[in-house]
Image: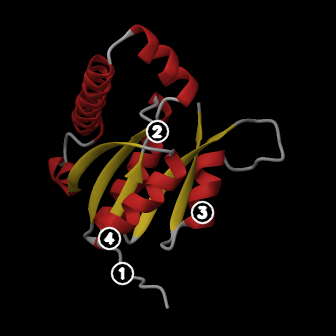
Amino acid sequence: MMNSTIKTILYTTDMGNHMRPVFRFAIDIARKHEAEIIMLHVIEPLSSGTLATINAYMPISSVQEIFQDGMKKALQKMQLRLNNFCEDEHINEPSDCEVISKVKVVSGHSAETIVQQAELLGADIIVVGTHTNKSMSSNLLGSTARKVTQFSKVPVLVVPVNE
């Protein structure tokens, strides 16, 4: 039987400008359940062909250094966006942003990594956005959101967003 108590929310973001409504939703859930939010951004690894091409022109240590620098920059960007969001949206209630307990940037395939991180971090729910558009297509959910809902052992809240 699934636990209905929500204490840890894993909010996943692709860091697009359109993700604010999804983050607002995560904050509202956290407030209502007195839960914490862990923000997660997943950076997809380079394909083997791309890595082979890069390695032909650069030493492996340089490639690793560039990758680590990219991870740090992504984390800094997430922190900046979080600060901007808190300033823009919650000026009267700064305590709302105190529900963010951790900001993480990890490398891996998005859906698999989100599900793994949810398990590793003890998340009670995953909040993920999915892109919407006016035309109906056979893919009503984005591929990452669809895969997360298929493989997650915890509930997944999919929030539609318009770009």
**Mark 2 and mark 1 residues within 8 Å of each other at the beta carbon:** no
**Type of amino acid under label 2:** Met
Looking at the rendered image, the quarter that the C terminus falls into is top right
Q: Distance between the residues labelled 2 and 1?
A: 25 Å
Q: Is mark 3 on a helix, strand or loop?
A: helix
* Sequence-first disc among 2 and 1: 1
Mark 1 neighbour density, 10 Å: few (under 14) some (14–19) many (20 or more): few
Residue at mark 2: 19
Residue at mark 3: 149
User: Considering depth in this image, is 127 or 151 the residue closer to the camera?
Assistant: 151
- As drawn, the label of residue 5 is 1
Q: In this view, does 18 lie above or below 49?
A: below
Residue 61, x across and y down, in percent: 26, 21
* Sequence-first disc among 2 and 4: 2
Side of 20 relative to 120 (left or right):
right
**Type of amino acid under label 1:** Thr
Q: Distance between the residues labelled 3 and 4?
A: 17 Å
Mark 3 neighbour density, 10 Å: few (under 14) some (14–19) many (20 or more): many
